[in-house]
Image (cartoon, helix red, strand yellow):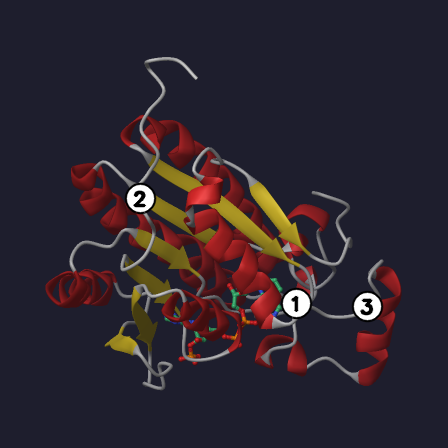
């Protein structure tokens, strides 16, 4: 440690946290984990249903004006966003030759461009604060690929390049940007898979099971906490070994 070593960051309690798509699935578990550690948590939903103890903010991430309005609401209630978790995402799976322009653009607009809108707006406040934590929820599929998910895999791989570019742009201002790449998680998104598909997936996962949403939340709160102060531009897999660290 030298004289130039920066002072340790302040304790994480009571920060203004924004989680998108927090009414169900992984986003809900993430929001609940931040509430449990005493943060002030806002959750975007399209139709309500944010968890207890959070501020429910209506926002469709495909609508730039709704994103701007959501940030204003959160800033008024909780102050500038110090931790952003860009979690909202969709799939429109089909094989490449059957994939329509709409299948492609709706997934890219929600998962990739939606995240661009969020991080651009969040970084404005974080640059003023000279601190911030941004966590993007990608997928193991972004690194491994998956038949029927050309659109989804492209959107999730795009988040890695986005995060690493932001890590370089924003690092000198005390803002970290990291990616969590879950494998298969028990949520509505994977609930559509058939029993045969689920069995085949479990066979490929070294840990032999799906993740719980809470296991993904653990990686997110770690990245947003003091113990990860020197981690940026990283991709943290939470995939039971499916991607072997990728
Ligand atoms: P769910 O389908 O259970 O929930 C998706 C969430 O995203 C919902 O809250 C949904 O809101 C919200 N959302 C979707 N579109 C929009 C939009 N246009 N604007 C605002 N919110 C939107 O998914 P998961 O919890 O499973 O997934 C969460 C994230 O984790 C996604 O990014 C997904 O790609 C990723 N992931 C999931 C994996 C899994 O196995 N489940 C594996 C790897 C990554 P609403 O309720 O209104 O539809």
Local packing at callout 3 (Cα closer than 10 Å; few below 14, some 14-19, many 20+) is some
Q: Residue at x 58, y 43 (%)?
A: 235
Q: How far apart are the alpha carbons under marks 1 and 3?
A: 23 Å
| SS at mark 3 in the image | helix
Q: Residue at x 34, y 52 (%)?
A: 12
Is residue 221 visible to the viewer in this orientation of the structure? yes
Between tags 3 and 2, which lies in front? 2
Q: Is mark 2 within 8 Å of ligand 1?
A: no
| SS at mark 2 in the image | strand
In the rendered structure, which disc, 3 or 2, sits on the residue that comes first in sequence?
A: 2
Q: How far apart are the alpha carbons under marks 3 and 2?
A: 36 Å
Is residue 137 visible to the viewer in this orientation of the structure? no
Between tags 1 and 2, which lies in front? 2
Decide: is 97 above or below 21.
above
> In the rendered view, does 152 fall on the left or right side of 241?
left
| Residue labelled with disc 2 | 132
> In the rendered view, does 5 fall on the left or right side of 72?
right
* Residue 232 image label: none
| Residue labelled with disc 3 | 201
Q: CB under 8 Å between callouts 1 and 3?
A: no
| Residue labelled with disc 1 | 98
């Amino acid at each position: 440690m030298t004289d130039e070593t920066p002072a340790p960051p302040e304790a994480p309690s009571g920060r203004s946290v924004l989680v998108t798509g927090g009414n169900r699935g992984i986003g809900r578990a993430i929001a609940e984990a931040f509430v449990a550690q005493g943060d002030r948590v806002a959750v975007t939903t399209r139709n309500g249903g944010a968890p207890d103890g959070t501020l429910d903010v209506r926002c469709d991430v495909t609508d730039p004006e709704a994103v701007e309005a959501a940030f204003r609401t959160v800033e008024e209630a909780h102050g500038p966003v110090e931790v952003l978790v860009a979690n909202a995402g969709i799939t429109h799976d089909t094989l490449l030759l059957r994939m329509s322009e709409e299948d492609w653009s709706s997934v890219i607009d929600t998962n990739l461009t939606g995240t661009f809108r969020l991080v651009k707006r969040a970084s404005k406040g974080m640059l003023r604060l000279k601190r911030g934590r941004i966590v993007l929820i990608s997928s193991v599929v972004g690194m491994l690929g998956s038949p029927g998910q050309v659109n989804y895999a492209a959107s999730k791989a795009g988040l890695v390049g986005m995060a690493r570019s932001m890590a370089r742009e924003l690092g000198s201002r005390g803002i970290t940007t990291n990616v969590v790449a879950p494998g298969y998680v028990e949520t509505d998104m994977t609930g559509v898979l058939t029993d045969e598909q689920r069995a085949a997936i479990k066979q490929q996962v070294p840990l032999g099971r799906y993740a719980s949403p809470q296991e993904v939340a653990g990686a997110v709160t770690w990245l947003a906490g003091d113990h990860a102060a020197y981690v940026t531009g990283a991709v943290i897999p939470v995939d039971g070994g499916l991607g072997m660290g990728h």
